Amino acid sequence: MLARLEGVTKRYRTTEGVRDLSLEFPAGEIVGVLGLNGSGKSTLLKLVAGLLFPTAGSITVFGAAPRPSRGRTVFLGETDTLWPWMTPRDASRFMEGLYPDFDPIRFNELLDALEVPRRKTKAMSKGERGRLRLAMALARSAKLYLLDEPLAGIDLISREKILMQLVREWHTDETILLSTHEVAEAEGLFERAIYLRDGRLALDARAEDLREQGKSVVQTFKEVLA
């Protein structure tokens, strides 16, 4: 089991990000983490990444408490933190210095596959920066990828390129947790869908089981979270 949450609650000052979550994530899954704004998607991913600590309950990742960024877990947050002066070459140097598991050769292959221009990020579109950030994440050698809204606010063509690359890059011993509001576009990726509502688990379902019931991931989203 790559990751396990048992009775996890994360409490902020006046609200709860997630409440009493118990989930398991084995190797070899692409999981959609779905919900409306404020449902707890980002909180869940940050807890698994070790960027937040639970108020109650326990989390293990690879059999131990999660540690941020190092090792076999990659977290790609929603916030664009690329500096305006940075080029893809600068990004490669930055990642090489920070992460021993970063592969610069693979990074350049991903830049080509995602059609990322070799210019400063201040001259890139939001979609181009999003594709650059994805290349930076996928060029690391990991077993658990936590992707928080990588499709948010970018153009349709960029979203399609990102989704196609995720399919190409995924290996059966790896697990991807993908948080997204673009459910209709991404649902073909998902083997499993986790629906969150107000920080609680509303439904944890296999995509194939939903289809056998004559439902799609999108339709179930509307039924469960409306």
Image (spheres, helix red, strand yellow):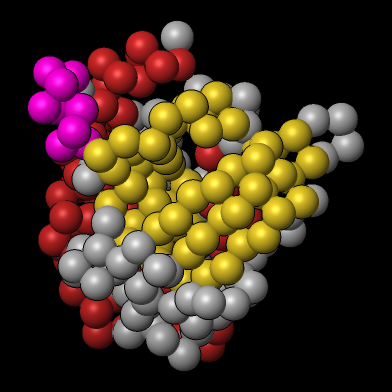
Query: Would you say residue 210 sits in the magenta stretch?
Result: yes
The residue under the point 25% across, 27% down is 217
Residue 185 located left or right of residue 129 = left
The residue under the point 23% across, 55% down is 166
Q: Is residue 109 visible?
A: yes
Q: Position of residue 161 (x, y in %)?
A: 19, 47
When the figure is inspected, residue 186 is found, relative to residue 53, above or below; the finding is above
The residue under the point 36% across, 12% down is 223
Front-lying residue, 33 or 101: 33
Q: Quadrant of residue 155?
A: top left
Q: Which residues are magenta?
A: 207-215
Q: Quadrant of residue 197?
A: top right
Task: Residue lying at the far right in this picture: please name it.
Answer: 13
Q: Position of residue 61 (x, y in %)?
A: 52, 70
Q: Position of residue 146 (x, y in %)?
A: 44, 57
Q: Is residue 126 visible?
A: no
Query: Would you say residue 130 sits in the magenta stretch?
Result: no
Q: How many marks?
A: 0
Front-lying residue, 76 or 71: 71
Q: Quadrant of the N terminus?
A: bottom left
When the figure is inspected, residue 2 is found, relative to residue 117, above or below; the finding is below
Q: Main secondary structure of the magenta part?
A: helix
Q: Quadrant of residue 112?
A: bottom left
Q: Quadrant of the C terminus?
A: top left
Front-lying residue, 49 or 158: 49
When the figure is inspected, residue 88 is found, relative to residue 4, above or below; the finding is below
Q: Position of residue 198 (x, y in %)?
A: 62, 25
